[in-house]
Image (cartoon, rainbow, N blue to C red):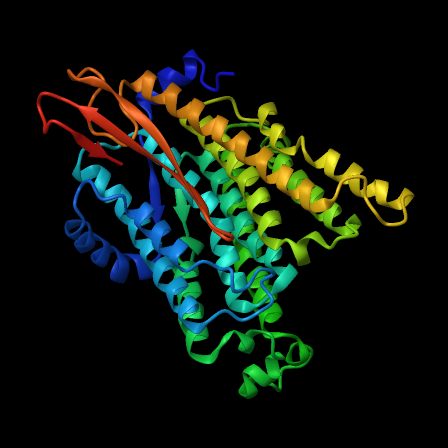
Amino acid sequence: MGYIGSHGIAALHRYKYSGVDHSYLAKYVLQPFWSRSVNFFPLWMPWKLFVVLLTIMCSQIYSPRLDSAPPRWVHFAHGLLLFLYQTFDAVDGKQARRTNSSSPLGELFDHGCDALACAFESLAFGSTAMCGRYNFWFWVISAVPFYCATWEHYFTNTLILPAINGPTEGLILICVAHFFTAIVGAEWWVHQFGDSLPFLSWIPIISGIPTFKVVLYSMTAFGVIPTIAFNVSNVYKIVQARKGSMLLALAMLYPFVVLLGGVLMWDYLSPSDIMGNYPHLVVVGTGLAFGFLVGRMILAHLCDEPKGLKTNMCMSLLYLPFAIANVLTAKLNDGVPLVDELWVLLGYCAFTAALYLHFATSVIHEITTALGIYCFSWQDRNDAGIPGIWVIIFLFDIEYSSCKWIHLTWSSSTAPLQITY
């Protein structure tokens, strides 16, 4: 199944990225740091692969249900690796301009990897905050603004980051939370808010709530909701200016809303408490489905497709009816579903992983063929040389998975063997 038509191929050749970052922290502190950092990394260095390898060394087997405290060095490692990820993510664009290798494929990879990182970082923060089954909600409050920002970008053609935004201030706050937890211990998060922060114990209602829940509610109220309002307002202005349909614009949110609703219904009906007992599988499986939805919307933007719901986005939802039907069989069988839910969850992860990999490999092939470029290589397809070899390396541990491509090329104009990532 092809994802890009002739109109999309023509649009790829015309596409130019447009983005605006109003963050003062990024402008006055981080941008100068990132500009200097780009000169310290060799052109061939696979930055995010480097971070993944270090993250695997900090395997989260210490907190299988995200409700037990791992060693404190793990929290420090999480904070450091997240900061490195943010740095490398920002340096990506600068490095692309430095090597004159910018392309629509680069944007698809950059934002697509960030969509998957929402799931992996929520699991890392879940082990830090010992939030157990509530970890899924921490993923939700990271995924919802991300999806809405992608949706806004699709309509406005400009990625707009407000003065306070998730990719900058949000990630820095999470880094600080990891480092802080390395000092005080993960148990701090499960204590009542009034005990964790005695000087705020006078605040009614929330003083008796676990600290991680107060953080969850605060992030939703002061971060997620204003961001969504900002995104919807910008899309509404564009739709009105173009005399379009706001209902048609909102239809693109449908697959994501159904994905969240389906997973929540599955958990509500589950006799096995899937979010409490298997939080990694729930978040990873749903995160892969989310990555597919985000990637498909980004591709629609790159290819200048007509605004509206893309029916193949709904493929990410196909597994959920079977999972829900399976838990309903427990009502007829003394609380025991027809298929053990662990196997159903593993199937869910396998389905979403296969869907995402099919999308990724297909789109990579179609874009590189259309633009005459190689993936993760600066060499043009028109250069003399033997076609490269692609190898997928799967890096997986209990809380982190990723894949990376290695491209081996031979060219008479370079060294006998060139390895690029």
Q: In the image shown, does 393 or 297 lie closer to the viewer? A: 393
Q: Residue at x 45, y 48 (%)?
A: 117
Q: Residue at x 11, y 27 (%)?
A: 416
Relative vertical location of residue 243 with respect to residue 192 in this rendering, above or below: above
Q: What x and y, as percent, mark residue 96?
A: 23, 38
Relative vertical location of residue 129 with respect to residue 14 in this rendering, above or below: below
Q: Is residue 343 visible?
A: yes
Q: In the image shown, does 226 or 144 lie closer to the viewer? A: 144
**Residue 9 relative to residue 95: left or right:** right
Q: What x and y, as percent, mark residue 210?
A: 63, 74
**Residue 381 relative to residue 259: left or right:** left
User: Given the current orientation, which residue lies at the most extreme top position?
Assistant: 6
Q: In the image shown, does 304 or 41 lie closer to the viewer? A: 41
Q: What x and y, as percent, mark residue 163?
A: 39, 57
Q: Is residue 237 visible?
A: no
Q: Residue at x 58, y 43 (%)?
A: 285
